[in-house]
Image: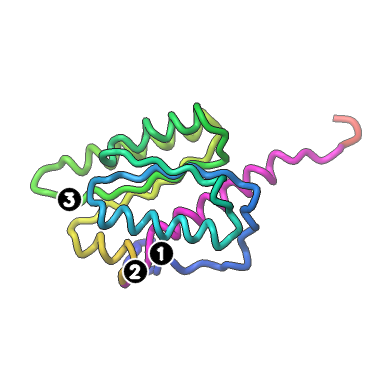
Amino acid sequence: MASALKNLSKYDKASLPTCEKMKFGIVVADWNEEITHALYEACFSTLKKHGAIDENIITIQVPGAYELTSASALLIEHKKIDAVISLGCVIKGETSHNEYINSSVAIGLTELAIRSGIPCIFGLLTPNNWEQAKDRSGGKLGNKGVEAAVTAIRMIDLKNNLSKREAKIGF
């Protein structure tokens, strides 16, 4: 669904489990920092609102969006986390540079999630202009950081529920 039709910050708060025992990695790109830091603040506060404790949220900053995938891989390799959330913003410019970056990050995070078994959340804004970026980082369309945090909580809960094995007789 196009975000123009949905507020990114609206969700059913009662449907989320507590995340007090969940461990999160958040990778934030510094490029377009006014946008990415707003995404981070919303993401962090949403995790806290649902029970996450400070010690279970590891945050690292990287220069730009392209580095989100490799930094996420490093977090998964070196820290015991249940999900990694990547936050960035690549605004369309005069060239197709944005398409290469956005595609690389999307494919990289997907491959990393499949390979590692750790949910890797795509919190990369891909707007056409600055106004669209502002609208999606706390403006009239809400904040993608909230959506990314909620997605991480839901994916960890899904993984936890699927990995619970019911005792069975036979095979």
- Mark 2 Cα-neighbour bin, 10 Å: few <14, some 14–19, many ≥20: many
- In this figure, what is the number of numbered marks? 3
Q: Earlier in the sequence, mark 2 or mark 3?
A: 3
Q: Earlier in the sequence, mark 1 or mark 2?
A: 1
- The residue under the point 56% across, 48% down is 155
Q: Gap in Å between the C-alphas at discs 1 and 2?
A: 6 Å
The residue that mark 1 highlights is 8
Q: Is residue 23 left or right of residue 74?
A: right
Q: Is residue 169 left or right of residue 143?
A: right
Q: Secondary structure at mark 1?
A: loop
Q: Gap in Å between the C-alphas at discs 3 and 1?
A: 21 Å
- The three-letter code of the residue at mark 3 reads Lys
- The three-letter code of the residue at mark 1 reads Leu
Give the main secondary structure of the magenta stretch. Answer: helix
The residue that mark 2 highlights is 141
Residue 144 belongs to the span the image colors magenta: yes
The percent coordinates of residue 18 (x first, y second) are 64, 57
The percent coordinates of residue 24 (x first, y second) are 52, 44
Residue 92, which numbered label? 3
Highlighted range, magenta: 140-167
Q: Nearer the viewer, residue 73 or 51?
A: 51
- The residue under the point 31% across, 35% down is 67
Q: Residue 17 sits in which quadrant?
A: bottom right
Report the quarter where the C terminus lies. Answer: top right
